[in-house]
Structure formats: C-alpha cells, structure tokens
Amino acid sequence: MQNLPTTLPDWLALLESRHAETHIDMGLDRVRAVKERMQLAFKCPVIMVAGTNGKGSTCAMLEAMLLQSGYRVGLYIKPHFLAFNERARLNGENASDEQLVAAFNAVESVRGEVSLTYFEFTTLAIMHLLAKAPIDVAILEVGLGGRLDAVNVVDADVAVVTSIDIDHKEYLGETREEIGLEKAGIFRPGKPAICSDPMPPKSLIQHAEDIGADLWLLGRDFNYQGDKQQWGYAGRSQRRNSLAYPALRGANQLLNASAALAALEALRLQLPCGAQEVRAGLALVELPGRFQVLPGRPAIVYDVAHNPHAAAALAQNLGNMGFHPFTYAVFGIMQDKDIDAVIAPLAQYVDHWCVADLPSPRSANAAELAHKLQSLRPAGAKDDEFSAKAFANPGEAFADAMSRAKEGDRIVVFGSFYTVAGVMAARKNSLH
C-alpha cells in the first residue's frame, strides 16, 4: 500500500483529489462491500434522520436531550462550516484529528479495489469511529435522499423523516411523491418509522406499509400544541407538558422537536429520558447556521436556506423579528437550485443584495444573479434604498454589507452552506 497521509488535512486533500473525477454512482453495493470487510456494526441503538430541511436541527435536539439524560452519544452530522471534525461528535465534542485519521486508515486498509466517493469514504470512516467508541446511542444524519445514501447501509432502530420538499431533483426525482419514496428508504420492517411532515407523500406511507414498518405520523400518532410561553408534546403513550421553546429559533422547530421526542418515546425502554433532562436539552441545544441570530448590532442572521421550503421558513422568521430600517442579504447559491423560488419569499424583506460567487464549480454566477435581482428594485427607489452588487466571495460581500449597515439594520447570510461558512471564516479571520 502506498504511504498513507498522517494528518487530517492531507487525508482530506487525498480524498478530494481521488474523487474529483468520480460522479455520484447511485447504489450501495460498493459501500456495503467495504462495510462488511470492516465488520462495521453498532452495539447500541441507532437513530437515523433524513429530510429535505430540519434534519440537522432534529439531530442536534436528540443529541442535547440524550446528553442531558446522562447518555454517551455519538453523532454524525453534515456538512461542516469551519472544520471537518464538526461532522463527528462524541459526547458533544468534535472528534480529534487523530481519531479521524485512524478511522480513515481503517477504511483504506480493507477497501482494496473498491472505488468510494469522498462522501462514501468519510461516512464509513465516521460510522466506524462511532461504532468503536463507548457510546449508548448513535445518531446518524442522512446526506442525500435516504434509500441510496451511504448511511443507509446501517439498519436504524428508529428512522425519522422530517420534511419532504423538492431539492436535488437530478438524484431524487421531480415530485414530492418520488422524493418521499427515496426518503422512506431508511425505514425498516418492524421498526419505528417517524414522519413529522404535516402532509406526508402517499408514497412514504405506502412504502412503510409495504415493508411492515411501524409508522408514526404527525397528527395521528404524535402531535404538539403551544402558546406564547410554552408548548407540549403528546405521543402514543407519553405526554410532555410545559416545555420551553427550543433554543433553536424559527417557525419549524416545534415540528423538529416533536420528531425528536417521538424518537425518544419509541426508545423509552432502552433510553429513558426524564422531563427535566428533556427541558434542559431543548433549552441548551445549539446548531450553527440554522436561523442563528448573533448577538450585537447590526443584527446578523446565519441561515443555510438553499431551497424554496427553507427560504419560505426564513422569510417567516425574518417577518417575526421586528422592525429594521434596512435588511442586507449576503447571498450565494448553487446554479442547480430553484433560484427564483428561493428569492421570491425573501424579496419583500431585502433592500440590499450583496451577491457572492461561491468556491464551487456549481456556484451560480454572482454578476448574473445581481443583474437578475435589479428587477426587484421598487419604482423610484434611490440607490441608498435598494441595491444589488456582485462580489468575488462571501467574505467580501459581507464586508460590504457591514460597511453600509447602520446599528438598527440587519444582515442576513443565506443561500448555501458555502455562503454561511465563507462569512463565518472571514469573521473569524478578522477577529484574529
């Protein structure tokens, strides 16, 4: 075997170079073959979470509530913002470089002639790392779809599908029915299959019935209700009352929290969680980039919204924030997204668009996007009332917004993980 990298950055660079040419080959045969050679198996309950939006929030709430309950928790979540280590968490802490390098070596030592994409390789490595760690529960976030996602070579004890909306059409299908079937691919016969989408596609329900999964539907098997002060969850056999709102802000977080509580209810015999621990977990949960409002003025909001469903939720959340004279959007997006439908709900809230090119060959062209956004200029608006400008990267777009925004204004960074990560990195660098 050739000399393998000894540092995490070198390993990641090797994986990126090795698979620059690899197109996503939808199918799990290669991943399953390597998994079997690695004898990868979890000795604890596994919760798997898929969905178009909300899966990261649901995973973070599960992690927080289980940690508060005293369990040792492994979490695989993606993508990362500033460091790859964010993808693998053990007991609330990011995995170390050394742990990840050892896991990469474990995959490479048995991979042989099997070609794996960057995502498949890193998924196997992180699942191996978690499976070998002394944990009581593993939480695995699905990347794309469900049925053919590399995570799905593991059998979940509880599978959760949060929301189903149109995204990644080239891989998952054009309709919610097609996408729902892909996401239902993580369900297993006889195991709890939880769906918190208020209008689940028929295909998802049918697939659960066809394979004999134990389907939990929002409104039928579990639901929530709340007022301005507190909320409550009701499941098949468990009620949780007088809950504080999750620390994650935003309109859809009670749907996500209900899905997480349904998963805990399904596992209540193996992993019982007390009322106080659940409250504390919801109050303390953190997840960067999901309607994350930073302290200080002007108000700065990070949101990784990059599809119409998420953009509509972001618009609703901005509408609930109160008055700001001007809103600046730092916006960059991939060209294969439904860009018009992402912009539409936000147009009424944004006065100044600072559009960025992203460090990806799939990035939409910032200059073309800025030109398109000029059409939103209200009749008679002066340049200090409306603008759309293009920038080479998110950091420069953010610097422009900061230079113009007054204390009472707000800056919303959205459109892609790359957009938010670019601004996070630029702000971190400027503080050093």
Image: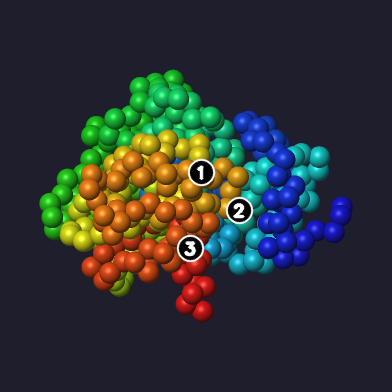
- Where disc 1 sits, the SS reads loop
Residue 183 % position (x, y):
46, 33
- Where disc 2 sits, the SS reads helix
Q: Who is closer to the viewer here, 34 or 17? A: 17
The residue at 30%/56% (across/down) is 383
The image shows residue 188, relative to residue 3, as above or below, that is above
Q: Amino acid at mark 3?
A: Glu
Q: Who is closer to the viewer here, 45 or 29? A: 29
User: In this figure, which colouring scheme has been used for the structure?
Assistant: rainbow
Q: Which callout, 3 or 2, points to the residue nearer the camera?
A: 3
Residue placed furthest toward the bottom: 432
> Which disc number belongs to residue 126?
2
Q: Who is closer to the viewer here, 156 or 198? A: 198
Residue 40 % position (x, y):
65, 46
Residue holding disc 1? 364
Cα gap from disc 1 to disc 2, whole angstroms: 31 Å
The residue at 77%/61% (across/down) is 5
Decide if residue 300 is in sight here. Answer: yes
Q: Are marks 3 and 2 in contact (CB under 8 Å)?
A: no
Q: Are marks 1 and 3 in contact (CB under 8 Å)?
A: no
> Which disc number belongs to residue 396?
3
Cα gap from disc 1 to disc 3, whole angstroms: 16 Å
Cα gap from disc 3 to disc 2, whole angstroms: 34 Å
Q: How many marks?
A: 3
The image shows residue 265, relative to residue 412, as above or below, that is above
Mark positioned earlier in the residue sequence (1 or 2): 2
Mark positioned earlier in the residue sequence (1 or 3): 1
- Viewed as shown, does residue 404 lie left or right of 371? left
- Viewed as shown, does residue 133 lie left or right of 373? right
- Viewed as shown, does residue 112 lie left or right of 143? right
Q: Amino acid at mark 2?
A: Ile
Mark positioned earlier in the residue sequence (3 or 2): 2
